Structure formats: C-alpha cells, structure tokens
Image (tube, rainbow, N blue to C red):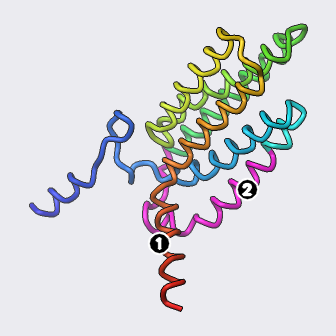
Amino acid sequence: MNMRLDRGASSRTEGGLSGSRRQYALRYGGGILLMGIGLGIVAAGKLGTAWVFPGLAVGAFLGIVGTVAAHRRIVARFGHPTRHQFLSLAGAVAVEMIAFYMIGALGLLHGIPDQSAWRIVLLVVAAHFLLMYWSMGPWLFWLGTVNLIWVALSAVLTLPLSTTFIGDGIVKAAVGVIMALPVLRAASAKGTGSVLSE
C-alpha cells in the first residue's frame, strides 16, 4: 500500500500537462542539446545571419558532447526511453524534414525578404517541437507554442531579425535548462561533493 502511494506521489504534472519525469527519459539529453542550440542561435542574432549555421553547428556540437557526458547519469536515474518515444522523435524529425523539402521544392522562399524566409524556417522548427511532446514531454509542447507566438509577434511588430533570433534562442536555452535541471543539479552536487571530500 505504501509503495503504491509512493509511486503515485512521485508522478507529477509538468508544465500543466499530465506526465511523470520518469516517463520521458529523452527529456534530459534533449534539454542539454537545446541549451547548446539556443545559445548558438543567440550568438547568430548577435553576429548576423551569416553566423546562423556556424552558431547552430557549434551549439549542437556542445549540446551533443554534454548529452553524451551525462548519458550514464541519465540512464541510471531515469531509465531508457521507450520504443514509442523513439518512434515519436523520429516521426517529428521526419515531418520537419519533409516540410523543409516541400518548401524548397515549391520555391516558397525564393524572392522574399531574408526576414520572412528565416521566420518561416523558425515557424517550421517551432511546429515540429509540438510533435515532440510524445517523445520528450510537455516542455517541448510549450517550447513550440512560445516559439510560434514569438515569431508571429516579431513579424507583426516588424522586429529586426537579430532580435527575433535572440528571443528565439533565449527561449530554447531557457526551456533546455528547465528540462535538464535534475541532471544539472546532480552533476553540480557531485562536483561539490568531490571538492569537499578533497
């Protein structure tokens, strides 16, 4: 009886949608990756659109390195993702790739201002985050929602593209921190413990 109550108590509601932390093992590595990508987008906003792809590449690389470094800790504490979660992740990425392929094949970005083209790109990326709810949990749904609102708002207010990028990157990095927070705290506590034991 007590065990059932404890298990029930460990189940939490994240971001307003029902779900348990242990239901979404991909969330933690995904959060670390988002932190790197978000910071890369912020850097691109500061340096100019020519730095978007280099910024994304460096940010993604750092995120992947961080995810690999934390992999054992994530698996030990939160377990492995389910097959359904892997398939949901693959499906979301496939939908994004198909959307970009269709945009390119139809020439929808030709002859329009850079600001409009980049906003379309950011909207597609934001929309595919909505589909990642089933693989990484509610925070990805809220990230996609906020990114969609931000990009639409930047278009309505005709904000500079640099501002659009910086805002988009900050949201991604912030949500990434929230998603990965349990792992970051554990790493911080382990580091502090090592220092104190010396």
Is residue 170 inside the magenta stretch?
no
> What amino acid type is highlighted by mark number 2?
Leu
Q: Tell me the tag on residue 62.
A: 2
Secondary structure, magenta segment, majority class: helix
Q: Is residue 82 left or right of residue 58?
A: left
> What amino acid type is highlighted by mark number 1?
Ala
Q: Tell me the tag on residue 150.
A: none
Q: Nearer the viewer, residue 40 or 134?
A: 40
Query: How far apart in space, not on screen, are marks 1 and 2 (Cα)?
Result: 21 Å
User: Which residue is drawn at the image coordinates 47% and 67% (left, top)?
Assistant: 186
Q: Residue 46: x percent and y percent? A: 79, 36
Q: Residue 69: x percent and y percent? A: 64, 67
Q: Check disc 1 and report its element: helix, strand or loop.
A: helix
Is residue 79 inside the magenta stretch?
yes
Q: Residues within 10 Å of mark 1 (few under 14, many from 20)?
A: few
Q: How many marks?
A: 2
Residue picked out by circle 1: 189
Q: Is residue 9 left or right of residue 46?
A: left
- Image height of 92 relative to 157, above or below: below
- Which residue of the protein is positioned furthest toward the bottom in this rendering? 198
Span of residues in magenta: 57-84
User: Which residue is drawn at the image coordinates 87% and 37% (left, top)?
Assistant: 51
